[in-house]
C-alpha cells in the first residue's frame, strides 16, 4: 500500500456570508501518496479551489482535517505549495522573472549564490533561460505561469497543488521530478 503523504479526512466547509449559509464541501476523504498525480475535476463552484486552499493550510475546514505525513496542517504549510489559476496576479510586476522566483528566500552569501543557480536552472528547465531578467509584463501568459511554477518548485515542496486548468508540467520539458513526491 502507498504511504499517504497528504491525507484529507472528513473535510467539510460551510461559509456564512452575505448570501446566507453555504456548504461548499461535505465529508471529503482521500489520500495522496508519493509521486501521485491527482486531478480534482468538477463543475464551476463545486468547491475545488476551497478544497485546495484547505489542503495548503490557507483555510481551516469547518469539519475534518488535512494531514501532511500524519501531522495535521493548521497553518499555511511551506511543504505544500499552491500555484493559483490567476498566477499572473501573484507575480510582482516590479521584479524580473529571476527575482520573482527568489521572492521571500533572502538569497545572501554562499547559500544565496546556490539559490540563484537553482532558480536559473529551474527557469532553464521551463524554457525561460533567456528570460530571467525580463519582467512579468514582458512575458506571455504561459511564460508567466512557468515563472509562478518555478517559484513554487524552488521551495522543494513535498506536495504541489494547482488551480490551473492547464498546467505546464503536463509537458515533458517542464515536468517536475520531485514536487509531487
Ligand atoms: N469566502 C467565501 N465566502 C462564501 N462563499 C464562498 C467563499 N469562497 C467560496 N465560496 C463558495 O463556495 C463554493 C465553492 O467555491 P470554489 O471557489 O471552491 O469553487 P470552484 O470549484 O473552485 O469553482 P471554479 O471552477 O469556478 O473555480 C462557491 O459556491 C462559492 O461561492
Ligand atoms: Mg476554482
Image (tube, rainbow, N blue to C red):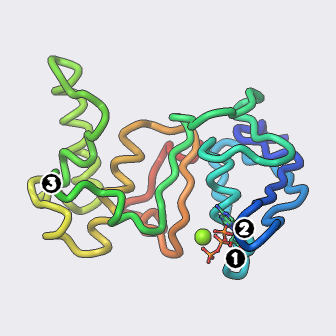
Determine contact: label 1, label 2, CB under 8 Å: yes
In the picture, the disc for residue 45 is 1
N-terminal of the pair, mark 2 or mark 3, is 2
Of residue 139 and residue 62, the one placed in the foreground of this image is: 62
Distance (Cα) linking label 3 and label 1: 33 Å
Distance (Cα) linking label 1 and label 2: 5 Å
Determine whether the beta carbon of the residue marked 2 sits less than 8 angstroms from the nearest atom of ligand 1: yes
Horizontal placement of 31 versus 59: left or right?
A: right
Residue 76 percent coordinates (x, y): 57, 37
Residue at the spot x=49%, y=74% of the render? 166
Of residue 135 and residue 179, the one placed in the foreground of this image is: 135
Of residue 22 and residue 169, the one placed in the foreground of this image is: 22
Residue 171 percent coordinates (x, y): 42, 69
Residue farthest to the top, as pictured:
110
Distance (Cα) linking label 2 and label 3: 33 Å
> Mark 2 Cα within 10 Å, few/some/many (few <14, many 20+)?
some
Residue farthest to the front, as pictured:
18
Horizontal placement of 108 versus 53: left or right?
A: left
N-terminal of the pair, mark 3 or mark 1, is 1
> Mark 3 Cα within 10 Å, few/some/many (few <14, many 20+)?
few
Tell me the SS state at disc 1.
Answer: loop
Tell me the SS state at disc 3.
Answer: loop
Q: Give the residue number, with chain letter if any, for mark 3.
A: 94
Residue at the spot x=90%, y=56% of the render? 27
Q: Give the residue number, with chain letter if any, for mark 2.
A: 47
Horizontal placement of 134 versus 54: left or right?
A: left
Residue at the spot x=10%, y=60% of the render? 134
Q: Quadrant of the C terminus?
A: top right
Determine whether the beta carbon of the residue marked 1 sits less than 8 angstroms from the nearest atom of ligand 1: yes
Horizontal placement of 43 versus 105: left or right?
A: right
Tell me the SS state at disc 2.
Answer: loop
Q: Quick check: 167 above or below 132?
A: below
Amino acid at each position: 500500500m502507498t504511504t499517504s503523504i497528504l491525507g484529507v479526512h472528513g473535510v467539510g466547509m460551510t461559509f456564512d456570508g452575505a448570501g446566507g449559509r453555504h456548504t461548499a464541501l461535505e465529508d471529503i476523504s482521500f489520500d495522496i501518496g508519493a509521486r501521485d498525480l491527482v486531478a480534482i475535476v468538477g463543475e464551476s463552484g463545486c468547491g475545488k479551489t476551497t478544497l485546495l486552499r484547505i489542503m495548503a493550510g490557507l483555510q481551516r475546514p469547518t469539519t475534518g482535517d488535512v494531514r501532511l505525513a500524519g501531522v495535521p496542517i493548521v497553518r499555511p504549510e511551506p511543504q505544500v505549495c499552491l500555484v493559483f489559476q490567476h498566477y499572473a496576479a501573484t507575480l510582482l510586476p516590479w521584479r524580473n522573472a529571476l527575482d520573482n522566483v527568489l521572492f521571500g528566500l533572502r538569497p545572501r552569501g554562499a547559500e544565496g549564490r546556490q539559490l540563484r543557480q537553482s532558480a536559473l536552472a529551474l527557469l532553464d528547465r521551463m524554457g525561460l533561460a533567456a528570460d530571467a531578467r525580463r519582467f512579468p509584463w514582458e512575458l506571455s501568459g504561459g511564460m508567466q505561469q512557468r515563472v509562478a511554477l518555478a517559484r513554487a518548485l524552488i521551495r522543494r515542496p513535498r506536495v504541489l497543488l494547482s488551480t490551473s486548468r492547464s498546467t505546464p508540467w503536463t509537458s515533458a520539458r517542464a515536468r517536475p521530478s520531485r514536487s509531487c513526491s
